[in-house]
Image (cartoon, helix red, strand yellow):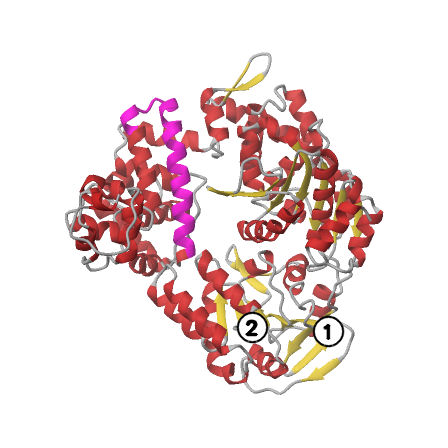
Amino acid sequence: MRATTRRLLKVLNIKHLYPPQQEALRKKVEYGESLLLATPTASGKTLVGLIGIVNRLNDEGGKAVYMAPLRSIAYEKAAFFEKLEALGFSTRIEVGNYAQGPRSADILVTTYERLDSILRNDPGFLREVSAIVVDEVHYVNDEKRGPILEALIARILHSNTSPQLIALSATVSNADELGEWLHAHVIKSAWRPVPLREGVYKEGRILYRDGELIEIPVVSPTPYINLVAFYAPRNAQMLIFSQSRRRVVSLAEKTAKAASDVLYYDEQVARETAKEVMKSEGPSSLKEKLAKLILRGVAFHHAGLSNRQRMLVEEAFREGGIAVIHATPTLAAGVNLPARVVILEEYRRFESGIRKPLTVYEYKQVAGRAGRPGYDEVGEAIIVAGRSDDPEALVNYYMASEPEPVTSKLSNLKSLRHVLLGVIDSGIANKRGEIKDYFRKTLYALQGDLNKIEIIIDKSINDLLKWGLIVEAEILESTPLGSMISKKYLDPLNVPRIREVLSKSGKLADTQLLYLVAYSPDMVRLPVTRKEEDYIMDRALDEFPEIVDLIEWFGPAELETIKILLLLSDWINEEKEDVIASRYSVGPGDVNAVVETAEWIASSLADVLPLLGVSYEESQRMRVLARRIKYGVREELLPLIVIPGIGRVRARILYNHGYKTLHDLAAADPARIARIPGIGPGTVKSIVEFFGGTYEGGGGEGLEAYM
């Protein structure tokens, strides 16, 4: 073991290495060898990545990159990596529009998409990188993120910089094939720090994978409640997974009602967490529901919660203030949150109108959360069987089987156009032959039919040519429009969609600009229920008839676009969040996702529109719209909203009391402002400090007296 590794272990207070970590040392991860580590959750994969990073930085200098599929994982890793400052290594995190840490930092923690965007805007950055850790590399198998990740790795393999590549994965059946693609040594292991016991529950019995059959008391007609009642007296924290948000919330309420008296949890932590939940953003009804459940040792966790609310639930669970979390499977793919017992309450989900069973891989991801290192001697993962299910068949299928192989998803035309434009604009490959050579570095080339992908490449190039994003003479080059689309990380399909709207509407008023944002292929989608369809159409006809004229057919996709349009319209016209949540059946996490995505699209389109012949005035209106979306305000509040701590509600209060400009506030008496209902001393302090002054209370003079 090298001295640098010893120093790292000392800083992290690690006394012993796990078997997969010891194997990584034998494979010379300390000496720059590339590695694929395919081992279960909590087997120490992150440490292997750090061992590679610190040794590579110590030997070669440069920078290291740690990339993950989800922001939640990136935030968690960046916080953990701050410990490396003791070794002299600084960390920066970049996800979405958020960045923290020095640009010169030694280690960049980011997401796949953000790193792709960074390389499109600064192709030379890769030359500075000496080590790259790819967390959750099995996401190559994901329909959405897979093509981005695969193209990123192909770019790394295609480059002549040869950084050390450390890929981390859950156990996969074709690890050797992935290792061949990555040119990496492979470590496969089923070792876990806490042994996993798997079983299937049905009608008062648990059939375990090893064949043991035990009976448990039946205290409820609801199967999972019997499991909660069985494990709770053993002081076992539980994660219970269901496939829909509505079911997750409903079952959390049922658990609190039926079993809270047998749950072990720290009531003080629960009370403090409930108070913090009530202070968080979002609809009051949702906060009250979650807080009341937490007080009884139960919580729900899904993407509709805000980041703050999810974090509070996770932290309370770690501190013992919550005994049971009901969650959607997104939790299993997110932050590190192990539990003594994991219960898969339903193993089928609705997809394309039918109930489909989860894949073996998806089950393994959920089951991998069972067992808390340092706390549990064993972790248990239990599937709840349906009435017609054979427990033995479920054991054989989910527990005794290998997960499905990871396969390339790069043949998707939409994804391939996006990737190709980045390849051409970055100068990675500028001839059709070079492009095909580049794609020979992909997993698809190893697994699939090269002739097929060459056909799709040619189709993608022809689309980019037709839309005016690239030109072809001796070489393929991006046009100014194509370069802008690539650098803004927009889907090339935005261009024909914008042209379609321009051809039908001519001048772009604010309504049409907002529609372009909602209509963008990059916009997140919110499903439209049958109950909502009439409401959405009626409002669109009443308030946006000019938009209805743009749409030839009102299918599911068009209704989803109008739903986003209406939500954004309500948001920028200062509708209350509780009203928005109720009106569109969404949570604060959904609103945040829509708003953040819409702001990015609007600010990007403000730079794209002039290249499509749109007037300067209209493109500037799009820029103003981006700011309104960011803050959720009408245009007149934009001057006030720049003051830290002045959100959309307080800005409106100040405006309605006559403080309409920054000059009005600079000349105001702080004591007078503090007396406005809804504006307290803390807000006044923020205002005074914004103008460079200090405020300790008092008043009677203009703000200038405090500067």
Q: Which residue is mark 1?
A: 377
- Residue type beneath disc 2: Gly
Front residue of 70/1: it is 1
Res 607 → quadrant: top left
Q: Which residue is mark 2?
A: 320
Label 2 packing within 10 angstroms: few (<14), some (14-19), many (20+): some
Indicate left or right for 114 with 693 as reference: right
The secondary element bearing badge 1 is classed as loop
In this view of the protein, can residue 471 be seen by the observer? Answer: yes
Front residue of 195/504: it is 195
Indicate left or right for 357 with 529 as reference: right
Residue 147 place in picture, x, y as percent: 60, 39
Span shown in magenta: 589-618
- Residue type beneath disc 1: Glu
Is 106 covered by the magenta stretch? no
Residue 648 place in picture, x, y as percent: 28, 50
